[in-house]
Amino acid sequence: MTKKINSISEIVHEYDAIVFDQWGVLHDGKVSFEGAIECLNGLKKSNVKLAILSNSGKRSLSNADRISMMGFQSTLFETIMTSGEALWTDISSNIINEKKFFPIERDKGDAKLWAESLDVSFEDTVHSAQAILLMGLPDGDDLINWTDILEIALDLNLPLYCSNPDLLSPRPGGKLITAAGVLAHHYRECGGRVVFYGKPHVEIFKKLQNILNSKRILMVGDSLDHDILGGFSAGWDTLLVKCGIHAPEFVRNNDTITLKKIINLKKCKPPTYLIESVK
């Protein structure tokens, strides 16, 4: 049964490491959430290892720079792992053989910045590509904006490498937008080959666990589909934050009833703990 807590400090002594999602948990993409910085500063004093595990198509350093600008000191974290970093590593290690990619990115230039020092090229048309690189979606785009491109890729039998499996992404003001994972799942449903990097796929959890060299780990996230499912699959305890993706469902409703409805609807695993926000 999921236990509701008021502060992470209530359970910090039970863990060697606490891993946080970013968007919808620590910040909204623009500013840090109230109390989040103070909470992490306090946890750090408890000598627990802190880390970030993010479904960001960008590399770890880019994410470290971004959260530092929001007030989270880089010294707080043992490591910052992103799905984009995991994909970059596999290409760098020649685990992935394709060299010519058609990029789908949130902002123009994201792919070239991400690929610095990699021996790859980015094609202007999908016809000259060997694979699709799906890093993110421009804000406001939906599946319909990319259907034609994906149909061509299917005809060409191109693999799609998805470094952001999220289905929704939070934005300031509680807004939720379509995220890159929607395209990846559509492509797979249509028969395309998709390689996912990031949550909820257990490989990235195991990789982070090896880096942390810890056994008692808590995953803190706002998505039952990604953070909670992935943490559960890795054998970690999990803490669901209400203020993120599922916030609209929790508003003015009983927490226990709402959580049960979401779990039954999504056929997913319940979190170990539930909390209003990171505090």
Image: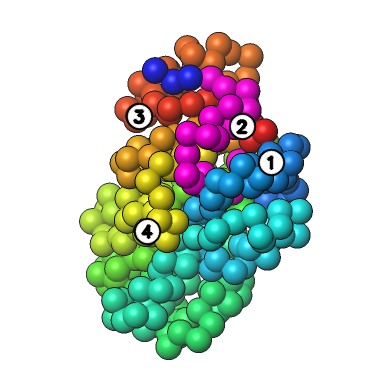
Residue holding disc 4: 210
- Secondary structure at badge 4 equals helix
Image height of 150 relative to 253, above or below: below
Residue holding disc 1: 42
- The disc label shown at residue 157, or none: none
Residue nearest the viewer, comparing 71 with 269: 71
In reply to whether residue 9 is colored magenta, the answer given is yes
- Secondary structure at badge 2 equals helix
Q: Which of marks 1 and 3 is nearer the N terminus?
A: 1
Label 2 environment density (alpha carbons within 10 Å; few <14, some 14–19, many ≥20): some
Residue holding disc 3: 269
- Secondary structure at badge 3 equals loop
| Left or right of residue 130: residue 73 | right
Q: Which residue sits at x=64%, y=35%? A: 278
Q: Which residue sits at x=52%, y=25%? A: 274
Q: Earlier in the sequence, mark 1 or mark 4?
A: 1
User: Residue 260, percent across and down?
Assistant: 42, 17
- Secondary structure at badge 1 equals helix
Rounded to the nearest angstrom, the CA distance separating label 3 from label 2 is 24 Å
Q: Which residue sits at x=34%, y=54%? A: 206
Mark 3, mark 2: which one is toward the viewer? 2
Label 4 environment density (alpha carbons within 10 Å; few <14, some 14–19, many ≥20): few
